[in-house]
Amino acid sequence: MTPLAWLGLLARDAGATLVVTIGFALLFAVPRRYLLGSALAGVLGHVGRTVAVERGVPLELATLIGATTIGVVSALLARRMRVPMSLFSMSAMIALVPGTFAYRTMLALIALVSTPSPPVSLATDALVLGTRTAFVVAAIAVGVVSPSLFLDRAR
């Protein structure tokens, strides 16, 4: 990938994440003065995941990297501004949610139960997709929460 194409990918990723993060922050009634912090956490986390995926890191581990970035940025902003960490992290992590994997898992499960004698490959697909979805969700939870645990113990 050329440097210009790489920069374009990251700019599109950052722009889309910015819109999603601010949109959910407004939906969650985050006060306007904290929107920039939410956006910063979301963009850094999602761009971090994108860079990791583009470099060949598996999606589950890349999501852990992105979620940990969101957790660290959110914890530092929360400490500095003396507000709850969730003010920044909740809207920031939405962009990491594996919507496509969850959707494909549900489609595979529906096909599995609606087919009279389903092939084994259909059950395997549903199991693999469901497992990957669960691991991505677990990576989000661990990544967002663990930095605050370590940073709070450092105090």
Image: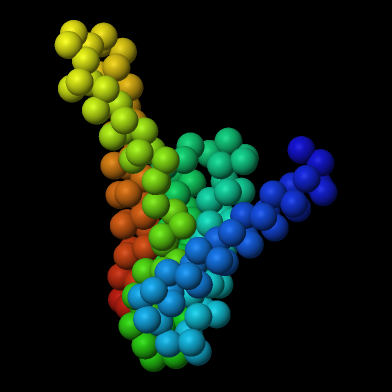
Which residue is nearer to you in this view: 91 or 132?
Answer: 91
Location of residue 69 with respect to 153 vertically, above or below: above
Identity of the residue drawn at 30% across and 70% down? 149
Identity of the residue drawn at 36% across and 75% down? 28
Rendering quarter of residue 91: bottom left
Rendering quarter of residue 93: bottom left
Which residue is nearer to you in this view: 69 or 121?
Answer: 121
User: Percent x, y for residue 56?
Assistant: 58, 36
Q: Is residue 72 visible?
A: no
Is 145 on the left-hand or right-hand side of 100? left
User: Percent x, y for residue 98?
Assistant: 40, 46
On the rendered image, what quadrant is the C terminus found in? Answer: bottom left
Which residue is nearer to you in this view: 125 or 131?
Answer: 125
User: Percent x, y for residue 76?
Assistant: 46, 79
Q: Is residue 69 visible?
A: yes
Is 4 on the left-hand or right-hand side of 109? right
Rendering quarter of residue 109: top left
Location of residue 153 with respect to 147 vertically, above or below: below
User: Percent x, y for residue 39?
Assistant: 53, 72
The type of colouring in the image is rainbow
Identity of the residue drawn at 38% across and 58% down? 143
The number of callouts visible is 0
Identity of the residue drawn at 18% across and 8% down? 117
On the rendered image, what quadrant is the N terminus found in? Answer: top right
